[in-house]
Image (tube, rainbow, N blue to C red):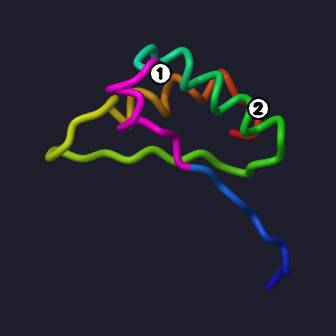
């Protein structure tokens, strides 16, 4: 067992739908900045009740835009 602490961040997909982050390219930039400052992972919520930006498609867009994949 290692003692490495890894931290991740949840992308603001729900807020993005209702604010100026509605362009998915801004969420890609958000993830790139998170990677630059040292986050190990990004996460995206998905729900049928309160729809936001679709999680799987967003994560697929992040894969080529980040390097820690």
For the point 61% across and 50% down, the residue is: 9
Foreground residue, 35 or 50? 50
Which residue reaches farthest bottom? Answer: 1
Q: How packed is label 1: few (under 14 Cα within 10 Å), some, or many (20 or more)? A: some
Disc assigned to residue 21: 1
For the point 40% across and 18% down, the residue is: 22
Tag 2 residue:
67
Q: Quadrant of the N terminus?
A: bottom right
Residue 29, given in percent of the width and then of the height, sits at: 65, 22
Q: Quadrant of the C terminus?
A: top right
Q: Is residue 35 covered in magenta?
A: no
Disc assigned to residue 12: none
For the point 53% across and 48% down, the residue is: 10
Q: CA distance from mark 2 to mark 1?
A: 22 Å
Residue 34, given in percent of the width and then of the height, sits at: 72, 39
Numbered range of the magenta stretch: 10-21
Q: Quadrant of residue 14?
A: top left
Badge 1 marks a residue whose secondary structure is loop
């Amino acid at each position: 067992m290692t003692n490495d602490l890894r931290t991740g961040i949840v992308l603001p997909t729900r807020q993005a739908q209702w604010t100026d982050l509605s362009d998915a390219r801004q969420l890609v930039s958000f993830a790139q900045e998170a990677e630059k400052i040292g986050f190990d992972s990004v996460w995206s919520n998905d729900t049928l009740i309160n729809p936001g930006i679709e999680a799987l498609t967003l994560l697929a867009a992040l894969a080529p835009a980040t390097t820690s994949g």
